[in-house]
Each structure stands twice: as structure tokens, then as C-alpha cells.
Amino acid sequence: MRYKRRGFHGPGAIKYKYYQLLVINLKKTVILISILCLLVGFIFFLNHDLMTPYVSIKDARETEGEYVQIVGRLDRSRRIRTHKDGSYSFTVGDHEGERMQIRAVGEKPEKMELFEQFVIMGRYDKKKKLFKADKVITNDTLKTTDKTRD
């Protein structure tokens, strides 16, 4: 109806109507795809530990300031220390024979002394010669799922 008021008649009016719908849908699609791309980028930016590589202790020392993950075994010859600021420190070793002092913030995992292997996420500080960990993950979840399967 509104096309007739503007002077559009016949098959040209139908083509123009579909052209307008196509342009509107195309604009909506571009906006939707842009918003989705921004959202995915924002999620990856916030969760930087999703894309962190596993490195050896030797490589972690060389990548100062870079957020990495290391896999290490607890050095039982040294004890786990709890500090006044709520952090705790311990020593880990890897399969290459390298050892590193770890200082982690947050709550110490329960029964940490019982576990052999840890995944430790954080950054190495060359000045203090220690690895500052944000997260320490034990293999506790693996053991509990193995027990429930039996």
C-alpha cells in the first residue's frame, strides 16, 4: 500500500520491496556477527588461561612475565610453607630434573601433601627467583572419578 502512495506500481515496486528487506536483513546479520565476534574475543581476553601453553620448568624461567602452565611433582624433601599474607610456597620438580620454588596465592588444596603431580598456572619472577602461581590444580579430580568408575 505505501508503495502506491509514493508512485511505485507494477513489478518494479515488488523488486524494490524485496531489495529493502534484503538490505535490512543484511544489516542485522552484519551487526549480529560483529557482536558475536566481540563477545568471543572478550571471553578469550578474560580467560587468558584457556590458551596458555604447557612448558617445562626450564622454559618457564626463560619466559619471564608470560602466563604459562607447568606440570610438576612435589619435592617431598622440602616442606610446604604457609605465609602470613595467606599465600603458601612449595618446591616442584619435573621429568628433566629441574626444580622450582612456587609461591601460590589463595587457599592451599586440601591434603596437598598426598598428591604427586600438579598443574601450576602463573608467571615466573626472575628478581625473586620464584614462580608466582594463580592456580594450583591437583590430580584429586582424576582420582575421585577413577574411584567412582570402579
Image (cartoon, grey):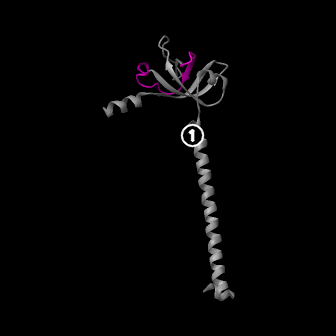
**Residue under the image location 33 percent in, 30 percent down:** 147
**Which image quarter: residue 112?**
top left
**Residue under the image location 65 percent in, 75 percent down:** 20
Give above or below for 148 relative to 27. Answer: above
Left or right: residue 110 compared with residue 124: left
Residue 148: % across, % down: 32, 33
Q: Residue furthest left?
A: 150
**Residue under the image location 66 percent in, 80 percent down:** 16
Residue 34: % across, % down: 63, 56
Please tell me which residue lies in front, 22 or 80.
22
Circle 1: element type: loop
Where is mark 1, residue-wise? 47
Please tell me which residue lies in front, 53 or 65.
53
**What segment carries the magenta color?**
94-115
Left or right: residue 13 compared with residue 88: right
Give above or below for 126 relative to 20. Answer: above
Classed neighbour count for the residue bearing mark 1: other residues with Cα under 10 Å, few (<14), some (14–19), many (≥20) = few
Please tell me which residue lies in front, 39 or 72.
72
Give above or below for 120 relative to 96. Answer: below
- Which quadrant, please, contains the C terminus? top left
**Which image quarter: residue 138?**
top left
- Which quadrant, please, contains the N terminus? bottom right
Give above or below for 42 relative to 98. Answer: below
